[in-house]
Amino acid sequence: MRAAIVSAYQAPPDVAERPQPSAREGQAVVELLAAALNPADLAIASGSFPAGSPPLPYVPGIEGVGRVVESGRFAPGTRVWASGRGLGVAFDGAFAERFAVPDEVLVEVPESAEDVVAAAFGQVGLAAWMSLSWLAPVRQDEVVLVVGATGSVGSVGVQAAKLLGAGRVVAVGRDEGRLQSLGALGADTTVSLESDDFRERLAAAVADAPPTLVLDLLYGPPLEAALTVVGAGARIAHLGQSAAPTATLPSGLVRGKQLRLLGYSNFAVPLDALAQGYADVVAHATAGRLRLATEAVPMDRAGDAWARQAKGRDVKLVLVP
């Protein structure tokens, strides 16, 4: 079968032949329909991923949508989304015509969802949705600050916050073009990280109503700035470090405002909650209530897609056989 194969750490995959997988006890085999390419796939292929990397050569891909070939839970032909329990991290991933995965992680894909949409809103959609609905649920009419709103997760986060009842959403990001487009997705105010007076602009944007919930994808200086303007008792759902791996959080701010910093990872969510979240996200996406720019890329061009992802493309790239 054809598969994208990483043969050297810090190098893009090449498409080549790979033996078809067989299902061991507790595993399923899935025939690929679509698989989203994620920043985590490149991080794992660096060879220095905190959770480890599969031994070389290996097939990347931490998530995929496909039809069941073998499973102890679902009938052959059932369309499923798969991610977690080591897929693409501890063993071969989903960027292959067929892949093996622990049976327990399979989630049935809603019948109305297109393959590319079902794949694109997996890790990305869940990261935003579960942070705001499960980890730190949005309260009716509260002000939500999205730090890192111009990336895929942040863009979905802006929309999810409004869907979940936020009264006002303030979006912070670097990409001026995408910032401008966020108004149509639910952002009431946008603040550019690229402006020289970013802190002053941010303070002015929330002066009348301090945020009580922050969705933080950046960490580092942007989060440090956000904490100076949030309200008392604010919750910070933290799920990314695109700006920096460390941040200085003054004790006085944390204590004085009674702040709560909550870390989030899709891989740490109970499987039943993740399955329900996935169903909710895909239903909203199929109905047009959650939108994300996507592009289907043939598997044979996996290396090109890899290079584009490394440059921070503003569309969600999805590999298809």
Image: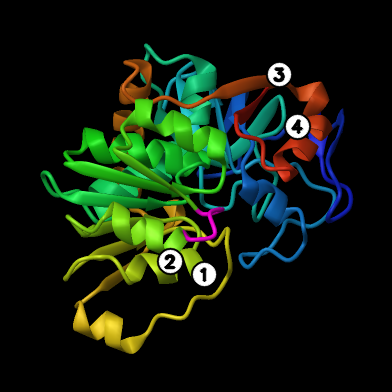
Residue under label 2: 223
Q: Are marks 3 and 2 in contact (CB under 8 Å)?
A: no
For discs 4 and 1, the disc positioned in front in the rendered view: 1
Pointer 3 local density, CA inside 10 Å: few below 14, some 14–19, many at least 20? some
Residue at disc 1, secondary structure:
helix
Closer to us: mark 4 or mark 2? Answer: 2
Q: Residue 300 occupies which quadrant of the picture?
A: top right
Q: Which of 214 and 72 lies nearest the eye of the viewer?
A: 214
Which residue is located at x 36 percent, y 19 percent?
110
Secondary-structure class at tag 4: helix
Q: Which mark is residue 305?
A: 4
Q: Tell me the residue that label 3 is attached to.
A: 321
The image quadrant where one finds the C terminus is top right
Q: Amino acid at mark 4?
A: Ala
Q: Nearer the viewer, mark 1 or mark 3?
A: 1
Which residue type does callout 3 highlight?
Answer: Pro
Comparing labels 4 and 3, the label whose residue is closer to the camera: 4
Q: Residue at x 41, y 33 (%)?
A: 182
Q: Position of residue 267 (x, y in %)?
A: 45, 54
Tell which circle, 4 or 3, labels the residue nearer the N-terminal end: 4
Label for residue 220? Answer: 1
- Residue 235 relative to residue 51: left or right: left
Measure the alpha-carbon separation of dots 3 and 2: 40 Å
- Residue drawn 43% across and 71% down? 224
Q: Could you tell whether 274 is left or right of 152 in the image?
A: left
Is residue 194 inside the magenta stretch?
yes
Verify CB contact (< 8 Å) between mark 1 and mark 2: yes
Residue 183, how many percent across, how many down?
36, 31
CB under 8 Å between discs 1 and 3: no
Query: In the orientation shown, which residue stands out farthest toward the top?
Result: 112
Q: Which mark is residue 57?
A: none
Identified by mark 2, the residue type is Leu
